[in-house]
Image (tube, grey):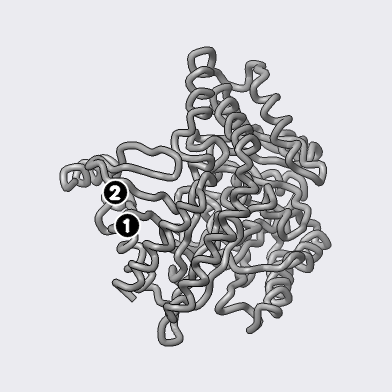
Amino acid sequence: MADVLTRRARLLGPHMTTFYREPVHLARGEGTYLWDTDGRKYLDCYNNVPHVGHCHPRVVEAIATQAATLNTHTRYVHDGILEYGEALTAKFDHDLDSMVMVCSGSEANDVALRMAQAMTGKTGVITTDNTYHGNTAAVSQLNTSKVPIGGFQDHVKRAPAPDNMMPPGGTREGQTKAFAEGVKTAIAELEANGHGVSALIVCPYFANEGFPTLEEGFLDDAIALVRAAGGIIIADEVQPGFGRIGSHWWGHQKLIFAPDIVTLGKPMANGHPVAAVITRPEILTAFQEGFKYFNTFGGNPVSAAAAMAVLNVIEDENLVENAKDVGAYAVGLLKELQTRYDVIADVRGSGLFFGAELWRDGKPATALCDAMVEEMRNRGVLLHTEGRFDNTLKIRPPCAFGRADADLLAETLDAAFGAVA
């Protein structure tokens, strides 16, 4: 392992990140499991990219078959992207029936921001104060984890992110109003500095904010303010999308609001680099007229085949319903653990995106959460942390995750808490 890490640092840079103090050197995957180069088996409770399970045979076959037939770009006409686009946009309401296919969620959000500029003629953007939307130069201005070189630009303003344990406004009931007030202040600042409001961009599950428990209509007041200021709404569905949150295909359906643009990414093709921007025809037309844009690999026949296979597997294997059923079962297991470990301050989630927030002595237990992640890794279960203080165990497995997997997760958590808490 030391030699591999040395080579990695030399080739990929000394700050190329890895998970865990002792990185996992993976060799293969299948379903909800991964194996390292020593043959050790791990239950994957974290990776949402293999949405229908690692190395799903139908996705593998779709990629191999299309790659052996044809792969090219979208300046040539091919049926694959059209068939996939029709199947995908059929999953949306609100006249969201046009799309641009790209290669990553970062690209999708970058395009979405430009769509908002083209549609509104304005450049100001509102997001939360604890978010992440990708890695391009434009999108990195939205993120709060690291200040960009040169500092944050003044066309981006932030509203206080919702939070279960430390809600803006002082109470969970009051944070809806507090978020709207934050948006109102941001609008005023953007109009005063001449940018105006092009968009509010949020993950409708507020995943990187720590996936707080929110009621239907949480965003209604904020959205009304943005629309009154001439802006549009972007829903970043990279994490909650494709049925992960159970009972709904998309996070915006759970909160019940109508986005103007939806961005998709990671799980869209089970690891093949596919992403998309879904929007209304008039917004897509404004973007195409306002920007010269072409993506060589976006929507190529192999990518379209991979994405179509994922869509079909979700339907055929009832993975949205599975996420709902197994997620509720797993949350119940975690709540039982909560009765026995007082460091578990909150258990929450929806579908197969859930977790437990850890506090100790009235403070976020960041160090304990990190210790739990390491202990779970050593016991053969992979998960990670989330939230403003990285004190929430983030559990986001492939959507093939079953009740037996949830039982193993809970048993291992029980043992790990007993060892480190």
Q: Secondary structure at mark 2?
A: loop
Residue receiving disc 2: 24
Whether 282 is drawn above or below 356: the answer is above
Instruction: Say whether residue 32 is visible.
Output: yes
The residue carrying mark 1 is 377
Residue at the (44%, 53%) spot, across then down: 45
- Residue found at x 49% / y 43%: 49
Mark 2 closeness class: few <14, some 14–19, many ≥20 residues within 10 Å? some
Q: Are marks 2 and 1 in contact (CB under 8 Å)?
A: yes
For the residue pair 251 and 331, the one nearer the viewer reads as 331
> Foreground mark, 2 or 1?
1
Q: Say whether residue 331 is left or right of residue 199.
A: left
> Amino acid under label 1?
Arg
> As rendered, which of 216 and 158 lies closer to the eye?
216
Q: State left or right for residue 302 relative to residue 378.
A: right
Which quadrant would the C terminus be assigned to in this image?
bottom left
Q: CA distance from mark 2 to mark 1?
A: 9 Å
Q: Nearer the viewer, residue 187 or 159?
A: 159
